[in-house]
Amino acid sequence: MQRDQVRSVRLTQVELDTVKRAAEAAGLKTAGFLADAAVAVAQAQGGSRAWLLDQRGRVEELMAASAQLARVGNNLNQVARVLNSGGQADHVDETVARVLRAATRVEDAAIEIARR
């Protein structure tokens, strides 16, 4: 089915960057991803604003958690460099365990969002 209706959407740069990354990961163009996402939400909930706001909050939390994990990943890379060069890093096991727990929480939240 050819999409022949055009609508304009305003996004912040951060929102647009997020949408572009998600579209790329899904193998879609940005406009197609936005259209598919909007239609899926509308069909799933009949346009319920309360549900949409609830989901938006979940997605925002998930994005924030993902960003935090990325920062922690950078820190782990720094720790790995120190260890690989013969240095010592304190609390490596504890740090790795915390990262794994956080990653599991992010993954569980993503699965929960996908189910809804």
Image (spheres, rainbow, N blue to C red):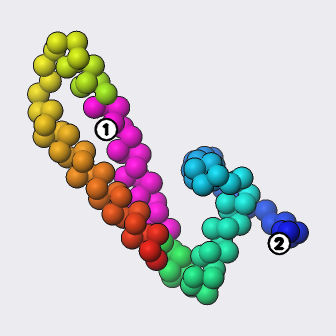
Label 2 to label 1, Cα distance in Å? 44 Å
Q: Residue at 79% across / 62% down in the picture?
A: 8
Q: Is residue 12 visible?
A: no
Q: Residue at x 36, y 45 (%)?
A: 68
5 and 60: which is toward the camera: 5
Q: Residue at x 34, y 57 (%)?
A: 106
Give whichever of discs 2 and 1 has the lower sequence position: 2
Please tell me whether residue 6 is drawn above or below residue 40 in the rendered image: above
- Which residue shows up at 44% across the image and 74% down it? 115
Q: Which residue is mark 2?
A: 1
Which disc, if any, is residue 41?
none
**Magenta residues, start to end:** 56-76
Element on which disc 2 rests:
loop
| Percent position of residue 102, x then y | 27, 52
**Residue 96 lies in what quarter of the image?**
top left
Q: Tell me residue 44's x, y (percent).
A: 57, 82
Residue 4 versus residue 73 in the image, above or below? below
- Residue 72 shows which numbered tag? 1
- Quarter of the image where one finds residue 97: top left
Q: Does 101 sit left or right of 107 as displayed?
A: left
Residue 40 vertical position relative to residue 13 in the rendered view, above or below = below
Q: Dot 1 surroundings within 10 Å: few (below 14), some, or many (20 or more)?
A: some
State the quadrant of the N terminus.
Answer: bottom right
